[in-house]
């Protein structure tokens, strides 16, 4: 959990994808996340957290639906959405916090 705190405490937007390899919608988000990261470059950070390997964190954050995407900035949650997103939709949301 302390590592998670350091992860989200950045001055730039941090997009976290809570996923499971067993979930098809989660797997389908991989190319979308790569496109978003490529489009926004150093202006954001993108991390993937496997809920199977981080069950305590998933429970603490009440992650239910997959994938769950969360944007943090300076340690504060700015946006959260469950379900697949498009590259354009995610890029648009992230740009609000850059």
Image (spheres, rainbow, N blue to C red):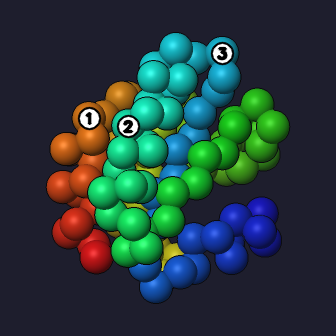
Residue 61 relative to residue 4: left or right:
left
x, y percent for residue 39: 31, 57
- Residue in view at x 43 percent, y 73 percent: 42
Q: Nearer the viewer, residue 3 or 39?
A: 39
Residue 83 located left or right of residue 88: right
Please indicate, yes or no, whether residue 26 appears anywhere in the rendered image: yes
Which of the two discs, 3 and 1, sits closer to the camera? 1
Q: Secondary structure at mark 2?
A: helix
Q: Residues within 10 Å of mark 1 (few under 14, many from 20)?
A: some
Marks 2/3: CA distance?
18 Å
Give the residue at x 60% y 46%: 48
Q: Earlier in the sequence, mark 2 or mark 1?
A: 2
Q: Label 2 belongs to which residue?
A: 32
Secondary structure at numbered mark 1? loop
Where does residue 56 sit, x and y in percent of width and height? 78, 45
Q: Which residue is mark 3?
A: 22
Mark 2 or mark 3: which is in front?
2
Q: Position of residue 67 (x, y in %)?
A: 49, 31
Alpha carbon distance from label 3 to label 1:
20 Å
Question: Residue 3's quadrant in the figure?
Answer: bottom right
Question: Residue 88 lies in what quarter of the image?
Answer: top left
Q: Nearer the viewer, residue 42 or 71?
A: 42
Looking at the image, do the residues carrying marks 2 and 1 touch, with CB atoms under 8 Å apart? yes
Q: Which residue is mark 1?
A: 86
């Amino acid at each position: 959990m302390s590592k998670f705190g350091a992860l989200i405490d950045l001055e730039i937007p941090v997009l976290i994808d809570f996923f499971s390899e067993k979930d098809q919608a989660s797997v389908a988000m991989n190319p979308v996340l790569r496109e978003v990261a490529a489009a926004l470059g150093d202006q954001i950070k993108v991390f993937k957290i496997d809920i199977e390997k981080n069950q305590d964190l998933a429970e603490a954050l009440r992650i239910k639906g997959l994938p769950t995407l969360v944007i943090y900035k300076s340690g504060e949650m700015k946006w959260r959405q469950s379900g697949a997103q498009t590259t354009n939709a995610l890029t648009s949301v992230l740009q609000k916090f850059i």
